[in-house]
Amino acid sequence: MSDRNGQLRANIQPGMDVEIVLKKDQKTGKRTTGRVEDILTNTPHHPHGIKVRLTDGQVGRVKNISHQ
């Protein structure tokens, strides 16, 4: 799998820039960008994306990991 895969917890670290889908945006798939503060999903894999909290407090599931 790609290292940009937001479904694998091992690919995500605090401080990374990611694109997430917020709960309110699940129907539209609108993405929000931000930096990971905390990883909220405890399992190593989640089919809808690992749930994270961004530094601004927003919570959603990772859809893409940005690489600088």
Image (spheres, grey):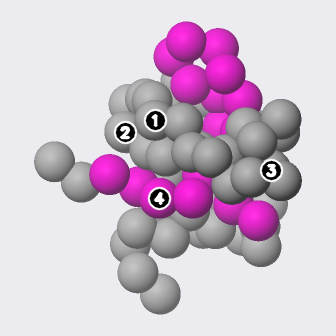
Q: Distance between the residues labelled 1 and 3?
A: 15 Å
Magenta stretch encompasses residue 65: yes
Residue 48 left/right relative to 6: right
Q: Is residue 67 above or below residue 47?
A: above
User: Residue at (55%, 12%) from the top-left corner?
Assistant: 56
Q: Distance between the residues labelled 3 and 2?
A: 20 Å
Disc 2 target residue: 17
**Dot 2: within a 10 Å radius of its alpha carbon, few (fewer than 14), some, or many (20 or more) residues?**
some
Residue at left 51%, top 16%? 55
Of pointers 2 and 1, the one earlier in the residue sequence: 2
Contact (CB < 8 A) between labels 4 and 3? no
Real-space CA distance between mark 1 and mark 4, rounded to the nearest whole angstrom:
9 Å
Q: Distance between the residues labelled 4 and 2?
A: 9 Å
Upstream in the sequence, badge 1 or badge 4?
1
Image quadrant where residue 29 sits? bottom right
Location of mark 1 (residue): 33
Q: Does label 4 or label 2 sit earlier along the sequence?
A: 2
Mark 2 in CB contact with mark 1 (< 8 angstroms):
yes
User: Spatial distance from mark 4 to mark 3, Cα to Cα?
Assistant: 15 Å
- Residue located beneath label 3 in the image: 26
Residue 63: where, in percent of width, then height? 57, 58
Residue 23: x and y in percent read: 83, 39
Indicate the secondary structure of the residue bearing disc 3: loop
Amino acid marked by disc 2: Asp
Question: Residue under circle 4?
Answer: 64
Distance, label 2 to label 1, CA atoms, is 7 Å
**Amino acid type for the residue under numbered disc 4:** Asn
Farthest residue in the front direction? 28
Question: In this image, 44 relative to 62: left or right?
Answer: right
